[in-house]
Amino acid sequence: MPTEPPVILLLSGSLRAASSNESALRTAESVAASAGVRTIRYAGLADLPHFNPDDDHDPLPGPVVELRTAIAEAAAVLICAPEYAGTLPGSFKNLLDWTVGGTEICDKPVAWVNVAPAGRGGGAEATLRTVLSYTGAAIVEPACVRIPLSQGTAGPDGVVADEDVRSGLRRVLERLAEAA
């Protein structure tokens, strides 16, 4: 009996619909089948309430339940987040803050793709590493890579056609699947 391919949850740290981070994740979706995985792109970043520890108890706000359920049901998580003012954008840090109080991401294989040009994005990576370590996520080092994308690289559908980018993202998905 064939087994279902592992599901990798795609988390974008950008609220911009046409961001390079979104393009990287849309491209990851387009190569998922050839990597032997299924992907689900989380789209609730803008709906999450501001994190308040006083609200981190049952019943949780609906958008937080959706986030934690998506993480719990995934075999692994792939993050693609921009750097803003030397760190993660506040909205994405807020998402990560909502994961600290739950156990869904603990021991879950997690990686990130940095699409910033050389010399940029290091602050976001450092913050990701710090926060994910607090949550107990299992960072898959070989899947944490830099695949620079410039604005306008993606087609009108938001997917990148460049085969080097596509094969790099395919390898990331494969490495996450191996760790799942």
Image: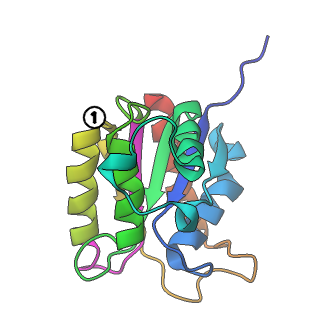
Q: Which residues are magenta?
A: 109-122
Q: As drawn, which residue projects farthest toward the bottom?
A: 152
Q: In the image, residue 101 lies at what x, y percent?
A: 34, 39
Q: Is residue 101 left or right of residue 4?
A: left
Verify whether residue 112 appears in magenta: yes
The residue drawn where x is 62% and y is 31% is: 6
Q: Nearer the viewer, residue 49 or 165?
A: 49
Q: Is residue 5 above or below residue 143?
A: above
Residue behind mark 1: 136
The residue drawn where x is 23% and y is 42% is: 133
Verify whether residue 149 appears in magenta: no
Q: Give the mark count.
A: 1
Q: Quadrant of the N terminus?
A: top right
The residue drawn where x is 46% and y is 39% is: 175
Q: Residues within 10 Å of mark 1 (few under 14, many from 20)?
A: some
Q: Is residue 132 left or right of residue 81?
A: left
Q: Nearer the viewer, residue 84 or 24?
A: 84
Q: Nearer the viewer, residue 32 or 40?
A: 40
Q: Amino acid at mark 1?
A: Gly
Q: In the image, residue 120 lies at what x, y percent?
A: 27, 79
The quadrant holding residue 94 is bottom left
Secondary element under disc 1, as helix, strand or loop, is: loop
Q: Is residue 154 left or right of residue 97?
A: right
Q: Is residue 136 above or below residue 130?
A: above
